[in-house]
Image (spheres, helix red, strand yellow):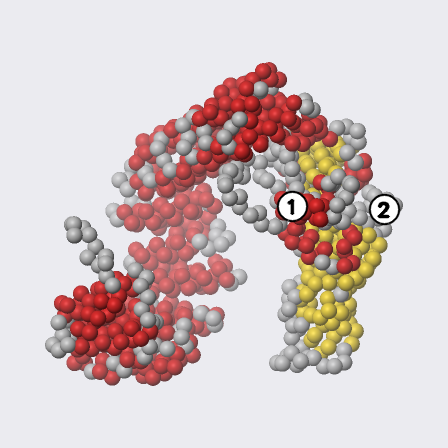
Amino acid sequence: SGSGSNPFQHLEKSAVLQEARLFNETPINPRRCLHILTKILYLLNQGEHLGTTEATEAFFAMTRLFQSNDQTLRRMCYLTIKEMANISEDVIIVTSRWDTLQNPRQRIFPPSGEGAAAPWLWLSCYSVEGTMLQAIERYMKQAIVDKVPGVSSSALVSSLHMMKISYDVVKRWINEAQEAASNDNIMVQYHALGLLYHLRKNDRLAVSKMLNKFTKCGLKSQFAYCMLIRIASKLLRESEEGHESPLFDFIESCLRNKHEMVIYEAASAIIHLPNCTARELAPAVSVLQLFCSSPKPVLRYAAVRTLNKVAMKHPSAVTACNLDLENLITDSNRSIATLAITTLLKTGSESSVDRLMKQISSFVSEISDEFKVVVVQAISALCQKYPRKHSVMMTFLSNMLRDDGGFEYKRAIVDCIISIIEENPESKEAGLAHLCEFIEDCEHTVLATKILHLLGKEGPRTPCPSKYIRFIFNRVVLENEAVRAGSFVSAIFSSVPWWPELADLVPLSPHRCMMDSDDEVRDRATFYLNVLQQRQLALNAAYIFNGLTVSVPGMEKALHQYTLEPSEKPFDMKTVPLATAPILEQKAEIALVTSKPEKVAPSRQDIFQEQLAAIPEFKGLGPLFKSSEAVQLTEAETEYFVRCIKHVFPAHIVFQFDCTNTLNDQLLERVTVQMEPSEGYDVICCIPAPSLPYNQPGMCYTLVRIPQDDPTAVACTFSCTMKFTVRDCDPSTGVPEEDGYEDEYVLEDLEVTVSDHLQKVLKPNFAAAWEEVGDDFEKEETFALSSIKTLDEAVNNIIKFLGMQPCERSDKVPENKNSHTLYLAGVYRGGCDVLVRSRLALGDGVTMQVTVRSKDETSVDVILASVG
């Protein structure tokens, strides 16, 4: 064989097991036995399966090798037996060695002084079964308090593993573990503390007592101190005492320990505590600041990495370290330099941005992609903090985009540039220009489709949209079918209706695409060309700009049902449930065209639709319009836990009550919730839950009719009472008595608001949707919001009250503005689109001019009546 080849490449299991008979020969040949054991280990790690009989025979033969005094051979035996312990039978042979191992003469490793007992203890935790554990209990107790540190540590670690087999047996060794905790050896002390904690971790009082004992008497082991700090930190997070607790004082005192490991652990624990103020963080930050100038790279890295985390929540607390962090920018370790610069980006002032960018440029090419992504994320956060510096950061990002790098690195840059474009409208042209240049030589299909989608959407809104056409047209000739189908067609045609001057160019591309080799490209080109040739703004808005907002699985089921029941009526899209999760503007990844499309998982609403359709009383209610989030009607600690989900249909509401009986001495039967409406709602029927055993959830329903006389009276408050039959039962057996009695339980009131009748839908192009709906039923009113003092508060309250989807990023109010326009889109119960334009002006309070458009007058009246 050639040099570098694998000597075990063509091993056969049967041949190796045949060679293993050599273990029985006398005298033992350590060199040959080592070679055979290596072969067995190789086979096991390559996934070769050994039968139980084969493994048992080899296992017994191997135990004879312990008679050898060869240290390497014995260690190899331990490794091999560990691997085979779960395969072979009669592993009791392991425990049968204990009597001989207790003899000091058997401790044959003079260099370590640990004898055969330490590795044998380590091996036992893999081979001992629950029934055998008591047989070795005496030996384990002796080993835990053994004077040889290696034996004691091995016994303690083995005990930790044996807890999984029999916790009760290991718990009896707690006195020996406490004795070992006072050992002078640092590892024995550490392992003893670990065993004590795991034996007591479910008893908070016992853990607290253990902490008090060891924090007062002190420890010699720095590892044990680190464990104590972690235990104390965990208790602090769970308790309400917070920073007034003695545990916090203990952690803070560890900042003055002589061991650097303990100091860092204490600083890290303080920083990760919730609700820490800058003042409480100050001692930990001071310690980390000292570590920044340490000659040890590992300490510098740990310090700057932890300060980086602090800067995310408390940048002001890290400002004092800026000088030390600037010194680390030139650190020879590029990981440290990167973390230092990203921390400075979070804590630095606006005036230091230019200088920091120049310093990053000097070394960014030398660091790995992983750290480059960290730098990009820090720049993105900085741009949100100092929006006026977007030009400097955009130039820097464009230079990074030209450098070599992997997909994750490039995606981080593209996402960062897109977020800058979204947050700073004045940076749009520069950002789009950089992205256009990037896709000319982009090897990542996902990024190309994402950028083309952005061009098709944002390009028409720039002063000179025609300059982006070249970049889009180049892609249809040069790119793969995924780019052509996934983004080119949608990008070019979503742009053309806004560019009348480019109408002459339109016929060139669609006809080329209609002859494309890929069917997806051909289909999209044909579809868009036919829509555009109609020259109707309403069609462009419905099928190009805003698209469908229905649930895909729901539409599939509705179409399938339509084919099963032949009808002369055309298929009505209003019978299809809406997509409950709106697509985020420009944030979602553009799906690639694949030969095997992924199966779309049914949404929460699709699941509810199927569940409710199975109940006979609800079959004639029509399509499910909306299902609300669950509303709690009782506290979690009460006798009965009840929450409600509101299912809205075109003319009815089904209230689903999820009930749980938390009393183990009661069985509830025929459980219903009686509802009394305050307005014109009519309660039609109640469907009971047959029974509610202890701690097993059940569902009951109440069906109500929405008022038809006054369509604008959609808001209502219901008083709710749960009624049921109680049968007492034995808590231990759960067997109920024969006789029961009627009882009731008053629940909290339940409100139905206008937001329950509206479903969020996203309109990526609000202006086109506004024109599509038309002004046939447009109404406008002005309101004074005297109790609201800021535009941000007004915007948030309006969105929450109406439950509609903000469009065109209008939910973000620019700084230092006294006026703002909020665009909202939704669908009213029954399937009609509703659009709201709310113009806000800040004065003595907020003045709001609301304009509502819909193709149905009722929905317009409902919204204006609700706001009024």
Q: Nearer the viewer, residue 344 or 635?
A: 635
What percent of the width, then of the height, locates residue 716?
79, 51
Q: Earlier in the sequence, mark 2 or mark 1?
A: 1
Residue drawn at point x = 33 percent, y = 40 percent: 368
What percent of the width, then of the height, locates residue 689?
73, 66
Q: Nearer the viewer, residue 551 or 742?
A: 551
Residue 123 appears in the rendering: no
Label 1, residues with CA under 10 Å away: few <14, some 14-19, many ≥20: few
Image quadrant in which you'd find residue 115: bottom left
Q: Is residue 222 above or below residue 781?
A: below
Q: Nearer the viewer, residue 439 or 290?
A: 439
Q: Which residue is mark 2?
A: 708
Q: Nearer the viewer, residue 17 or 188?
A: 17
Q: Secondary structure at mark 2?
A: loop
- Asked if labels 1 and 2 touch by Cβ distance under 8 angstroms, the answer is no
Residue drawn at point x = 58 percent, y = 15 percent: 504
Image quadrant in which you'd find residue 826: top right
Image quadrant in which you'd find residue 150: bottom left
Q: CA distance from mark 2 to mark 1?
A: 32 Å
